[in-house]
Amino acid sequence: MTNLCPDLQAYGNYPGIDLQGANLKDIDLQGCNLSGANLSGANLSGADLRRVNLNSANLRHSDLSRAHLTGADLVNTNLSHANLHCADLQRANLERANLNQACLIEAQLLCTRLRRAKLNNAQLICARLDGAGLRGADLSHADLQEVSLSRANLSFATLHSANLERAWLLGACMRGANLSSAQLTDADLSGAFLVAANLRDANLQNAKLFRANLSDALLEGCNLDDAKLSRAYLSGANLKNATLNRAEMTEVILLRACLEGAELCQSLLNRAYLNEADLSKANLNDANLSSANLTRVNLQDAPVIAARFEGSLGIDERLRDDLRHRGAIVMLIRYPDSTMLGQADLETLCQVSEAKDNIVRRFDDLKETLQAFQKIIGYVKAAVQDHSCLATSDLSKFDQECEGFRESINAAQENTFAHLETVHNGDLQQWLIDQYPQELDTIHDNIHRLSQLTYVFHELWISLLDRIDDKGYRFELSDD
């Protein structure tokens, strides 16, 4: 084996070579072709394997701790039980790789491709996977404590029973992901995209979900005690029997959501939008629903002792009396000019005012999504402009696209408000019931489309980096 090492370094082309159990510690194999090689049990700790071709190689039980694998081709590679502690795998291609029970503690996997990779029971504590592509990956039972997955693509990934305590998932795309029974206590999922995700029986206690999109997500039996859900979007979400005690849900959107039997004691739902939500048998004792919109909400058999409904909208006289009888604190808004229009008309106008304020904030969310899109375009432009090895083209059209987005956002907002000015008082309530939910859905559909474009351009950026000599381009994803 010792005689092979100089040959490997000199010629670098040994596909299918058998190096089982070889001691290759600290060896320099940059750019070598070792596709299909047998390196099972080999010692490659500290080795320089940048841009090496290990496609379909066998590295089972190998030691790759502190190895340099930037830009390496590890497609279909068997790395099960491998030691990759503190390894540098940035921008490596690990699509369909087998990393079951591998040790990736503190590994660097920024922008790494892990599409459909197998990471069952893998250890990824404190690893960095910001911007990584994990679409369809299997991370069941993986240990991801304090892992950084900001802006990572985990759409349709399986994270069943995975441990994500104190993980960073800011802006991560987790559409359709399976997070059932996952541990996400103290995790930060602010701005994450979790549409139609499965979070049944997951533990999200004290998690941050500020402005997260959980529309149509399955959260049945989920633990969200003390979670931060302000301005989150949960339209059509299933929160049946979930616990949300002391949860911060200011301005949350729960349009048509199911909260049947949920525990919401001492939760903050002030200015929440609960149009057509099902809160039957939900425990709302000591909850704060001040200024919340409760139009056509179902509160049947819901305990409401000491729950505050001060200034809540959509409460008719019958519901008001019923809530008071059940121990709730209900104080309707009193308008100084109620003799002019009547209490009902003024309440509708107040609802419209709240709806307009809410739409403004949702448009602000959309504008922030646009800013993230502009940022990744900036990365793409910088990569192209700073390196002559890349084919150059007119990139000003990207800036024009962004400006077009910005103008369309402003125009849509102005059109909505202009339309409201022409609606007669008698039609305002119908607008709240029929059109306002559609306005919210449209805004969040646009946020989704813009987010998807951001992920597409992110993939483009990674592809560009793969064409650049890693010594000639340094990059670091910002935390914002």
Image: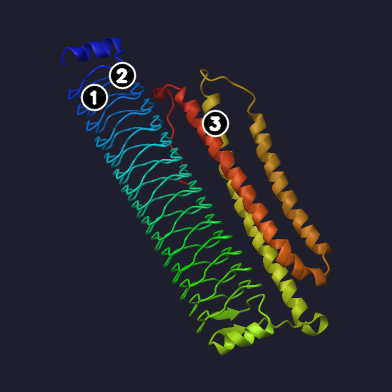
Name the residue tied to disc 1: 39
Q: Position of residue 257 (x, y in %)?
A: 57, 64
Residue type at the position of mark 2:
Leu
For the residue pair 85 and 182, the one nearer the viewer reads as 182
User: Please, which residue is most extreme toward the bottom here?
Assistant: 325
State the residue at coordinates (26%, 40%).
Answer: 103
Q: Position of residue 177 (x, y in %)?
A: 46, 48
The CA distance from mark 1 to mark 3 is: 36 Å
Q: Nearer the viewer, mark 2 or mark 3?
A: 2
Q: Which residue is mark 2?
A: 34
- Rounded to the nearest angstrom, the CA distance separating label 2 from label 3 is 31 Å
Kindly identify the amino acid type of the residue bearing the numbered disc 1: Leu
Specify which label sits upstream in the sequence, 1 or 3. Answer: 1
Q: Earlier in the sequence, mark 2 or mark 1?
A: 2
Q: Who is closer to the viewer here, 139 or 244? A: 139
- Residue located 26% across and 33% down the image: 66
- Residue drawn at 47 percent across, 27 percent down: 465
Question: Residue 322, relative to residue 6: is it above or below?
Answer: below
**Image point 27% across, 10% down: which residue?**
10
In contact (CB < 8 Å): disc 2 and disc 1: yes
For residue 65, above or below residue 211: above
Q: For residue 479, which quarter of the picture?
A: top left
Which residue was labeled with disc 3? 380
| Residue 367 appears anywhere in the view | no
Type of the residue with mark 3: Val
The x, y position of residue 88, in whole percent, is: 32, 33
